[in-house]
Image (cartoon, helix red, strand yellow):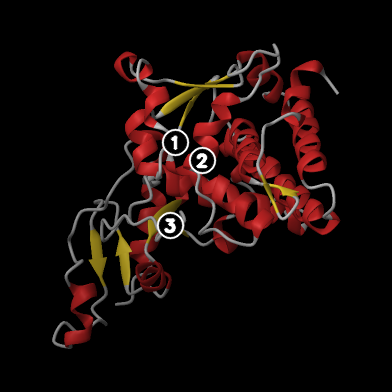
Amino acid sequence: MTDALACLTRLRVGHSRGKPAPNKPCLMLAIICEIQSGHITSSRIAIDERLIAQYHDLYELAADSRQEARPWLPLWFLASDKGPDGQAGSLWQPDLPPALSEVVDQLGAPRSLAQLLKRYTTARLHPTLHARLESESSAREAAALIIASYFPSRPDLQTRLHDYLELAFASGAYERAPERLKGDQQGPPEQQRARSAAFRSLVLEAYDYRCAASRLRFITPDFRFLVEAAHLIPFSASQDDRPVNGLALTPNLHWAMDNHLIAPGPDQRWHVSAAVDPLVVDNRWLCELDQQPLVLPRDPRWQPDPDALAWRLDHLQR
């Protein structure tokens, strides 16, 4: 065990029914996953939807519940822990505004994520620890230390957490090199799951969790996303899991596109099949989509491939 990682075995955690509370360990595991995916690229960490959703996924594995995750607690109390230098409060330092820093001790702990985000939206992980966690081998060692230290009496849970992290690390490797997501790679099921997970993460993040057709963006209080990642050209025909071959869609519109009732075109507008009768009241939700603009990612790298849009329009029911 390297000295920089030893601090991860000494987190100040509460106990419930004689077992360590999973909040801080799950948050640190989520941070490790996000560093390995390339989403966190420096020791200054944004408290964003993706990190919080990752934390909820891990907490659900550890506690069989998402509703009790309360991410604001580990995000706040992690600031009391020692970093690799052994100094209290050096592991995690919230970027508090100067005026708030002077009175923060009087405020007490936040009671919701919204309240926490009013205090700070970024924090700094100890730079030495961050540098170690950029290495995959060190990240794996760190994750193994956390799991062994805080879930010692639950071998079944240890196995589930290791399986989760294995998938997260594999999909993260694809996220760091998305060009690898194109091509016929008939690998083992684990490889296909990693590709699918990377496709989903990249597409949903590219569209900021907003539907490319309806513009709906909804995230549940326990951080589940309304939208799904939909292929433009099906993977079976394209072997292409790059985000340029995908859209974020609500489940009903994903279904409608896969059944060729609607299609985004190269003109970056939505088209509705002539097979959808506009005189039927129940069809209006689809008909109203006709000629509406396609919601596009802000980053031009992830905007849909014109050839994939043309494929969709060519396959629209006539």
The residues bearing labels 3 and 2 have C-alpha atoms spaced at a distance of 22 Å
- Hey, which residue is sitting farthest bottom in the picture? 280
From the image, state whether disc 3 or disc 2 is nearer to you.
2
Depth check: 38 or 263 in front? 38
| Residue at 66% across, 38% down | 13
For the C terminus, the image quarter is bottom left
Depth check: 228 or 238 in front? 228
Rendering coords of residue 68 (x, y %): 53, 56
Mark 3 secondary-structure assignment? loop
Q: Are marks 1 and 2 in contact (CB under 8 Å)?
A: yes
Amino acid marked by disc 2 = Leu
Rendering coords of residue 226 (x, y %): 40, 61
Neighbour tally class for label 2: few under 14, some 14-19, many 20 plus, Cα within 10 Å: some
Q: Which mark is residue 73?
A: 2
From the image, state whether disc 1 or disc 2 is nearer to you.
1
Neighbour tally class for label 3: few under 14, some 14-19, many 20 plus, Cα within 10 Å: some
- Hey, which residue is sitting farthest front in the picture? 106
